[in-house]
């Protein structure tokens, strides 16, 4: 990449309210070595996931999934649809609620 050029990334942010007492299990599943990262990591368009816990509310978490592009994410969802649904269904037992905060585009220098 030449000086002054930027590369865009596609970012999806989710908010979770975790069932009290399930925080450690949630962190294992959604963390850097967790099931979601292993699933996403099987795709070349995946960059990373950041797991954030609210500093004031220990039951509130955000995940920040970073992909090369919207097309890369959409292709992953199509190709891994069944695996995605299976993991999502198992993870519902850990949370009170889940909502997509939004989809963003970021510039990376």
Image: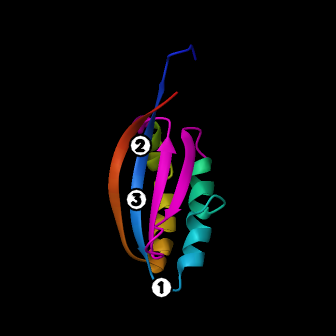
Residue that numbered label 2 is attached to: 74
Measured Cα–Cα span from mark 3 to mark 2:
16 Å
Quadrant of the rendering where the N terminus is positioned? top right
Residue that numbered label 3 is attached to: 14
Crowdedness near tag 3: few (<14), some (14–19) or many (≥20) residues, C-alpha within 10 Å: some
Residue 10 placement (x, y as % from top left): 43, 39
Residue 91 placement (x, y as % from top left): 49, 72
* Disc on the earlier residue, 1 or 2: 1
Residue that numbered label 1 is attached to: 20
Measured Cα–Cα span from mark 3 to mark 1:
19 Å
Looking at the image, which residue is at 57% across and 47% down? Answer: 48
Q: Secondary structure at mark 3?
A: strand
Measured Cα–Cα span from mark 1 to mark 2:
33 Å
Depth check, mark 1 against mark 2: the one in front is 1
Q: Which residues are magenta?
A: 42-71
* Disc on the earlier residue, 3 or 1: 3
């Amino acid at each position: 990449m030449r000086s002054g050029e930027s590369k865009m990334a596609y970012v999806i942010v989710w908010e979770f309210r975790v069932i009290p007492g399930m925080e450690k299990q949630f962190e294992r599943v959604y963390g850097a070595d967790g099931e979601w990262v292993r699933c996403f990591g099987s795709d070349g368009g995946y960059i990373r996931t950041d797991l954030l816990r609210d500093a004031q509310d220990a039951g509130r978490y955000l995940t920040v999934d970073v992909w090369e592009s919207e097309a890369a994410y959409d292709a992953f969802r199509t190709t891994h649809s069944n695996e995605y649904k299976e993991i999502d269904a198992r993870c519902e037992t850990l949370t009170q609620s889940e909502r997509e905060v939004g989809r963003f585009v970021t510039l990376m220098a």
